[in-house]
Image: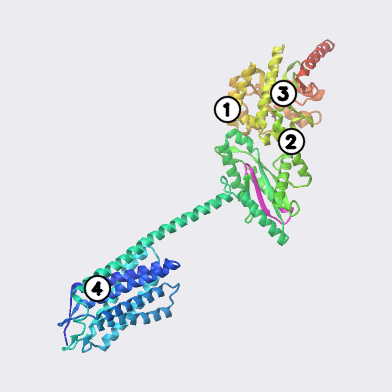
Amino acid sequence: MLVGSYNPLLVLLSLVVAILASYTALDMTGRIATAQGRAAHWWLIGGACAMGTGIWSMHFVGMLAFTLPITIGYDPFLTLLSLLLAISSSLFALWLVSRRALPTPRLIAGALLMGPAIAGMHYTGMAAMRMSPAILYVPWIFCLSIAIAIVASGAALWIAFHLRQQSFRVRLYRAGAAVVMGVAIVGMHYTGMAAARFPLDSICGAAHDGVDPNWLALVIIVVTLSVLGIALLISVLDLRLESRTALLAMSLAEANQELTYLALHDNLTKLPNRALLNDRLDQAMRTAYREKGRFALMFMDLDGFKAINDAYGHQLGDQLLVAFAERLTQQVRAGDTLARLGGDEFVLLAVVGDPTEAAEIADQLIEAVREPFAVGGHSLHVSTSIGVGMYPGDGEMADQLLTNADAAMYHAKMLGRNTYCFFETSMNANVHEQLELVQELRLALTRNEFVLHYQPKFEAPDGPTLGFEALVRWQHPQRGLLAPDQFIPLAEKAGLIVPLGAWVLDEACGQIARWGQDGHPQWSMAVNLSALQFGHTALIDTVRNTLARHALHPSRLILEITESTAMHDADASMRILERLHEMGVRISIDDFGTGYSSLLYLKRLPASELKIDRGFIRDLARNSEDEAIVSAIIALGQTLNLKIVAEGVETEYQQAFLTRLGCDSLQGFLLGHPLPADQVIDVVTRAALLSEAAAPADH
């Protein structure tokens, strides 16, 4: 037998090519698994060509590494046929591992088909030498090489299938697996070579008309490495492009999701907005109609929000809205929808069995809001008014149901706020009337429809006149003269109370200045400040400019604020009142006894007088408890060196009782009704004459 030998360098190169081909095969399986549509077919074909060329190249380099003592050549046709076998088996392998699943029977069948194909490639390449006599093979080694090919194919298929994902860790596993697969392929090849026996008189039939092996090795190695390198480079570039595309797609999806969320949710509170509420409301109506069910629509408004917003600014107002929404959310049941329509208006859609259950939910919401809100370093006390509309019954369409719930909420506010009302048909007419009145109220200032009446304030018990309290009236062109309680709440809700209050202040200061010029410089003028006006940032400048405009001494102006307004935020009130006091303006605490004053703050307030609420004066003759309260208030005021004013004096008993306790001044219908400015001088003069005429008779 002829004894062959191997070129160590070419043997090493064959191992390198096998490992590289194995890594390329593993990478191709990952690309095919992630590709879709026509791209997957192109990756399958390209990967099969690259992988098959790599395996065949390893085989052929291994063949070229083997030399005999005779001249060797290779038949071009059979050599090409062995290449086609390598590509075909690679195509089958890549197709198999790109399936969604690779059960054991399919894996075994694939190995039994692919292993003989790889072995066939090897022995076809050996046949390309066209040896004469034919190559002899040791049977057991020949069978061993085929067994190695089958086992190696099965292992390669299993590894390729389980390393299809694209990640850094998987690429590391692929590198290790490629080494194992490369060694297995090389082992199969050289086992097959070891099975070959060449007789001493052997002649290579392809030595003269076949391919020259001297330059073939270099060409094959260069071409193969180029093919594998290009395949890997394209795979890497495509993977990066795919990753960027996926990242861009994910970013676009997130952006679309965020835009969709923003389109359906309130930006401040993150609650559903009107658009999403309308959709949920339509769904609830369809469900209730189909299943004969019921639900409640609750329209909520935050009482006193405008006052807080004007007093502390929009930023703190927004924080209060967020805290209000969070507290309501804690009370909302799963499946119900809490939405914000805008401003301080919220809506709750709640599935209920009957109105009683809706009333229980409304009670829970009111109770939850009653606790103070800690916002921006302030403890804010607010409440909510709730209007309840039931479906079916209070509206067949979503807009109608929402409008009716709003009408019920408005009615709850008219009842005193901090309560709830169920919708009734008569409420629509009231709401329509109130809306008309609001529109007319907006025009009343420009049309000069407001007038002031002045109620005199007397030194106890019956004079002389110390000053007046300015009381606004609306001379409506159709409705006649309207009292404050008919339009002041509307002015507060519509945001008109601040300009209206500024007009009242200006008109009152102008009038008292004119009376001073007419010989009554001792008279003072009391003007009520609403909570919104008191908290408005322009209050100090408005008062200062008004006094300067009418050349009125500040001590002749008394600004009345209610006890609850002064104590709402005592520290902030203190700062405002101190600035007014420094200006020279006098301060009166109105409706004293109805709030929850802290004596610690009360003694620090720069007030000059306390005004006892008329509710305590009204029942003095019949209620000893009110007498005790009035006595305590007067004693407290005297202790704090404050003047005591009693309003609502309507009987001589009240007059005598208050005078006896030490009340400084009295105000009420017994002594004088509110009068237009042109009647004040005549009435006061006539009262003074009567008082003087009666004086001698008293003696």
SS at badge 2: helix
| Amino acid carrying mark 4 in the image | Ser
Q: Which mark is residue 575?
A: 1
Taking the view exactly as shown, the residue that stands out farthest to the right is 697
State which tag comes first along the sequence, 3 or 2: 2
Which tag is nearer the camera, tag 1 or tag 4? 4
Does the magenta segment cover residue 690?
no
| Amino acid carrying mark 3 in the image | Ala
SS at badge 4: helix
- For disc 2, the neighbor class at 10 Å (few under 14, some 14 to 19, many from 20) is some
Q: Is residue 566 above or below residue 364?
A: above
Which tag is nearer the camera, tag 1 or tag 2? 2
Give the camera-side residue of 217 and 140: 217
Q: Which residue is mark 3?
A: 470
- For disc 4, the neighbor class at 10 Å (few under 14, some 14 to 19, many from 20) is many
Give residue 227's quadrant in the image.
bottom left
Q: Which residue is mark 2?
A: 437
State which tag comes first along the sequence, 1 or 4: 4
Instruction: For the N terminus, give its image quadrant.
Output: bottom left
Residue 428's x, y, as percent? Answer: 76, 44
Question: Quick check: 255 left or right of 524?
Answer: left
Q: Residue at coordinates 61% horizontally, 36% vertically from top-left?
A: 308
Residue 643's x, y, as percent? Answer: 68, 21
| Amino acid carrying mark 2 in the image | Leu
Residue 660 in view of the camera: no
Q: Which residue is mark 4?
A: 14
State which tag comes first along the sequence, 4 or 3: 4
Give the spatial CA distance, label 1 vs label 4.
92 Å
